Structures are given as structure tokens and as C-alpha cells.
Image (cartoon, rainbow, N blue to C red):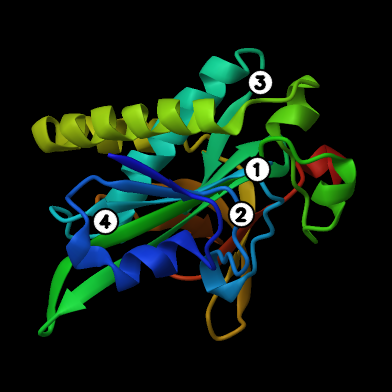
Amino acid sequence: MLVVLDQVDSTNTFLKNHFDEFPDGAVVAALEQTAGRGRLGRPWLQQKNNDIALSVVFKKLETGFHAGAIVGLAALEVAREAMPQSELFFKWPNDLYSADKKLAGILSEGIWRQGRLAGVVCGIGINVNSDENALCAIGQPATSFFALCGQKFEIKNLLERLEKSIARHYIKYERERARILHDWRRENRLLGRMIELSFPDGKRLEAQFSGIDDDGNLIALCNGETTVFGCGDVKILPSPAKR
């Protein structure tokens, strides 16, 4: 089920407010968001009918990590079909990258009823037709389908393809959960790379990306010590030759 709204403040906020009205797996997209947001309260800018903003209702999931894996893999599949020459990968915990620039970001939020988790709303924003001026306004290194391949894309067509891919990956998750998580880990191509961990209390730590555990936490090594990182932000550091 795909519903496309002309304008909304935030697709995640809309689905959180209408969670009980939509069936499991429903996708709500907006051609324009007026108050889009990402992780850690960051705003996400979307030009009207220029980029993708959508959210998905998941009523059978227990964690936002699994929701992000399903939506992220679906977005990666559609992006690779549209841009087969582009090198794309996930940057933990939920960003889609090309080289050192962000192409898409995911935000998962739990829905609670009477003290129990009733499901998850998972939103994704994808830069599609944004030009260099729009990307520079984002405030962090970013890219788009247009910047990567010099071609404009029809948003509604991409939305239909993405909705179908999300549905396929959700069905696959229900049948082969371990396979979905394996695929998601495999696409996090930072093994051995140096990263900077930013903790919620403001602490920063440079460490080496070592892996991802079964709960979606990042495992890093620093001075021979293992750090399990589950909340905060991650920055990819330049290779030693470029630092």
C-alpha cells in the first residue's frame, strides 16, 4: 500500500499520529515536507517533488534496527538499479553513502501502547534531484542521484519501485530474518576503517571499525580495548595517507 501526500510536516510524524489507521507494511510518502527531521533532531530539507521522503508502518517488528535494515536494503536495491555505476554502502547506523557523501538517512521510532511496543515507524529521506546548491545548503557532505549520474529522475516512479522493494524485503525478513541482517552487515563496508565515535555525553573517541553485533551495535577497537557503541554518531575518518 502506497499513499502519496502532496505536503506534510513529516511523514514519520504523520504515521505516528495515524499508526492505528494504516495496515502493516503501509508506505506513506510526501512530495514535500515542511518539517522533515533525521537522527539526533537534525532537520532534513526536501525540495518539492525533488527528493524522496517516506515512512513505513511495521507492526510485527520489535526494534528500530530491524526496520532500518529492511528499509535500508530496499533503498540500496533501488539506488543501484537506478545508478548501476555508483559505489554505494551503509554507514552505521542508518545512512546510505557514496564515497564520503551522504545520499540517504533513516529514522526509526517506536510506537507504544499501554507501556508496550506496538510497532515501529521507519522513515527515509533520499536526495534524488537535488543540485549542488541544494546539497551545499544541507550543512554536511551530501550527494544525490543527479549529482552522481547527471540525470534527473521521476519521483513517483522511484516511490513505486521503493514501495515494492520494501514489501519484498519485509516478506524476506519474516521468512529469513538472519539473511536480512547478514545482508545489512555485509553492506556496511567500513571494516578496518578508522572512525570517530561521538557519545551522547559529548565524549569523542577515535577507533577502528570492527563489526556489528546481533543487536545492531557497532563494535570498535581502541588501544586494544573493545567498545560496544549503540547510541550516538559516527564519522568516517580519512585514511592515514589523506589525513
171 sits left or right of 184 in the view: left
192 sits left or right of 49 in the view: left
* Element marked by disc 3: loop
Residue that numbered label 4 is attached to: 215
* Three-letter amino acid code of the residue under disc 3: Ser
Residue that numbered label 2 is attached to: 32
Q: In terms of depth relative to the viewer, which is nearer, 140 or 150?
A: 150
Q: Position of residue 98 (x, y in %)?
A: 67, 34
Residue 80 to residue 114: above or below: above
Q: Earlier in the sequence, mark 1 or mark 3?
A: 1
Q: CA distance from mark 1 to mark 4?
A: 36 Å
Q: In terms of depth relative to the viewer, which is nearer, 27 or 174?
A: 27
Marks 1 and 2 close (CB-CB < 8 Å): yes
Q: Residue at x 52, y 40 (%)?
A: 90
Q: Residue at x 66, y 13 (%)?
A: 85
Q: Nearer the viewer, mark 1 or mark 3?
A: 1
